[in-house]
């Protein structure tokens, strides 16, 4: 009975917040570009000030990742994302083509439902708040229950910063009683216009099934291929830094390394140099025994250190170990090391030649990461191009850690913490999501040419191929009502031709 009461409270809360958001968004939509930019700037500054505090809250509440890396993620959202969007036009006429005489006018989508994961709660709230307000939208967050306190605090900080800089109250809100029924109500309610869904596959699927436009993400079972031409020391360093960051909670982090046989031992030595531990067969079996539960990833290992994971499996790893690596040959959803692990655990596959490596990487993506991210360490441009053309991934990260490259921290990709997987991953877009995805664009198009048609002997009208006056084709105008208009001279010509054909 108590659970049912909580669900009803959650559903009602979602409705209440949406009504407040609708009224607030109407006011926000009236602000100028200058006013919006001032609000977003203040939000970014406040987020940066509280980056460490929010990271500590998230780490303590969820038990995922570590404070240092979560602080960096919060700062990335506050600084890098802000730098990418601050000069973006999102109000009024945002573009024009003088030649074609077309104007593009930005309009906000309205009220956004923001679903927040437990792995990256505060950085995701900072990110989604910034891109929502930049595009003049209101946003209502549904946090993961295990990250409720830190999510509420992050939303409170962003809302306060927005209001202090001139935004209306209730433009950023967060549910205090999150539940599955409440989140479903938030996503499907008539006042919700767009959903930004970051979370597990079930939640993303629910977003797409809500009947509302939704930007969801897919799982990131990221393979990384190491070619014989790669700078092995650099590749090893990048992979370990990327995979160990926040204990593997970024969905774009590496999940499997595919290496050429002839460089395998040298590369393993480099990996060990930067903190990798190659598991023995017995140790690998122990780790495998705790990776899955009920056929899916064991949530108890998510975002945990190698030492904590080892303890669960009855193993001890020194403090300097950053990533656990197990050699694997098989690929499949039932093969623990070949799936997305969201922890500092890597699979290692050995191949003979880049063609075999390409096939293995495709199979790994098909096992649970279609459309997300692929990494390659290589100096041979022809090989890079061959992989890029074949891999079913939306982000191809070259010579960089995929966790950082995929979100745009170390590459030229648009900085974002919501990464679309395209139709590969059943998503609407393959883009890194930003304010540009949260606006409707109206196009004002001026008439610049007449409709080209021709008359046949039977008197019917057909599309003309050219405007050659020597043929029977004519320039005929179409008025605003869609009616064809002709001049007196053209009518006279038509009458003369008909009379001639009738031999009158």
Image (cartoon, rainbow, N blue to C red):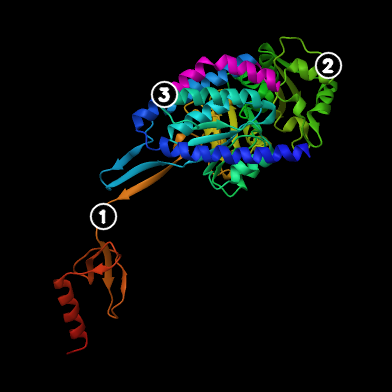
Give the x, y percent position of residue 92. 34, 39
Give the label, 3 or 1, closer to the camera. 3
Q: Residue at x 51, y 20 (%)?
A: 47
Q: Which residue is mark 2?
A: 315
Q: Give the Cα distance between marks 2 and 3.
A: 53 Å
Q: In the rendered view of the protein, which quadrant contains the C terminus?
A: bottom left
| Residue lying farthest to the top in this orientation | 319
- Among numbered discs 2 and 3, the one appearing first in the sequence: 3
Residue situated in front as seen by the camera: 457 or 253:
253
Residue situated in front as seen by the camera: 443 or 476:
443
Q: Are marks 3 and 1 in contact (CB under 8 Å)?
A: no
Above-or-below relation of 421 to 66? below
Quarter of image, res 55: top right
Give the x, y percent position of residue 371. 59, 39
Please indicate, yes or no, whether residue 501 appears anywhere in the rendered image: yes
Rate crowding at label 3 as few (under 14), some (14 to 19) or many (20 or more) other CA atoms within 10 Å.
some
Q: In the rendered view of the protein, which quadrant contains the N terminus?
A: top right
Rate crowding at label 1 as few (under 14), some (14 to 19) or many (20 or more) other CA atoms within 10 Å.
few
Quarter of image, res 498: bottom left
Residue 49 on the magenta segment: yes
Q: Residue at x 62, y 48 (%)?
A: 209
Give the label, 2 or 3, closer to the camera. 3
Q: Secondary structure at mark 1?
A: loop
Q: Residue at x 67, y 38 (%)?
A: 9
Q: Which residue is mark 1?
A: 447
Q: Which residue is mark 3?
A: 165
Which segment did they paint magenta?
40-66
Q: Are marks 2 and 3 in contact (CB under 8 Å)?
A: no
Q: Give the Cα distance between marks 3 and 1.
A: 42 Å
Q: Secondary structure at mark 2?
A: loop
Q: Secondary structure at mark 3?
A: loop
Q: Residue at x 59, y 18 (%)?
A: 54
């Amino acid at each position: 009975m108590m659970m049912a009461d909580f669900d009803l409270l959650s559903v009602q809360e979602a409705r209440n917040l949406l009504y407040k958001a609708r009224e607030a968004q109407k006011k926000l939509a009236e602000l100028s570009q200058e006013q919006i930019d001032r609000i977003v700037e203040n939000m970014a500054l406040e987020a940066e000030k509280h980056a460490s505090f929010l990271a500590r809250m998230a780490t303590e509440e969820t038990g995922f990742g570590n404070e240092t890396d979560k602080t960096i993620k919060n700062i990335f959202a506050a600084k890098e994302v802000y730098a990418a969007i601050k000069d973006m036009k999102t109000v009024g006429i945002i573009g024009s083509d003088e030649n074609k005489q077309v104007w593009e006018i930005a309009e906000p989508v309205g009220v956004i439902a923001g679903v927040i994961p437990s792995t990256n709660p505060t950085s995701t709230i900072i990110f989604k708040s910034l891109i929502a307000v930049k595009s003049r939208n209101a946003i209502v967050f549904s946090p993961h229950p295990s990250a409720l306190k830190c999510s509420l605090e992050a939303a409170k900080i962003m809302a306060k910063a927005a209001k202090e800089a001139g935004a209306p109250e209730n433009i950023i809100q967060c549910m205090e009683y999150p539940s599955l029924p409440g989140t479903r109500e938030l996503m499907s309610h008539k006042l919700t216009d767009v959903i930004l869904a970051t979370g597990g596959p079930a939640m993303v699927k629910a977003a797409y099934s809500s009947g509302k436009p939704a930007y969801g993400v897919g799982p990131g079972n990221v393979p990384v291929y190491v070619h014989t031409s790669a700078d092995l020391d650099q590749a090893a360093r990048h992979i370990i830094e990327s995979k160990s960051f926040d204990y593997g909670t970024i969905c774009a982090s590496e999940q499997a390394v595919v290496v050429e046989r002839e460089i395998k031992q040298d590369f393993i030595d480099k990996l060990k140099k930067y903190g990798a531990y190659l598991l023995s067969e017995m140790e690998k079996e122990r780790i495998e025994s705790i990776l899955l539960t009920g056929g899916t990833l064991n949530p108890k290992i998510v975002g945990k250190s190698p030492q904590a994971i080892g303890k669960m499996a009855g193993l001890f790893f020194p403090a300097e170990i950053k990533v656990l690596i197990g050699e694997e040959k098989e690929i499949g959803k039932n093969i623990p090391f070949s799936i997305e692990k969201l922890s500092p655990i890597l699979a290692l596959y050995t191949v003979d030649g880049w063609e075999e490596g390409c096939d293995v990487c495709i199979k790994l993506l098909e096992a649970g990461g279609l459309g997300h991210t692929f990494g390659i360490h290589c100096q041979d441009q022809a090989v890079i191009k061959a992989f890029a053309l074949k891999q079913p991934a939306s982000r191809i990260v070259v010579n960089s850690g995929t966790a950082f490259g995929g979100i745009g921290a170390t590459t030229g990709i648009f900085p974002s913490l919501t990464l679309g997987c395209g139709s590969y991953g059943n998503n609407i877009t393959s883009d890194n999501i930003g304010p540009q995805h949260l606006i409707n664009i109206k196009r004002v198009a001026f008439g610049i040419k007449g409709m080209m048609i021709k008359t046949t002997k039977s008197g019917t009208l057909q599309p003309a191929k050219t405007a050659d006056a020597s043929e029977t084709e004519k320039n005929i105008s179409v008025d605003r009502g869609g009616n064809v208009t002709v001049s007196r001279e053209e009518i006279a010509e038509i009458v003369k031709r008909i009379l001639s054909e009738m031999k009158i």
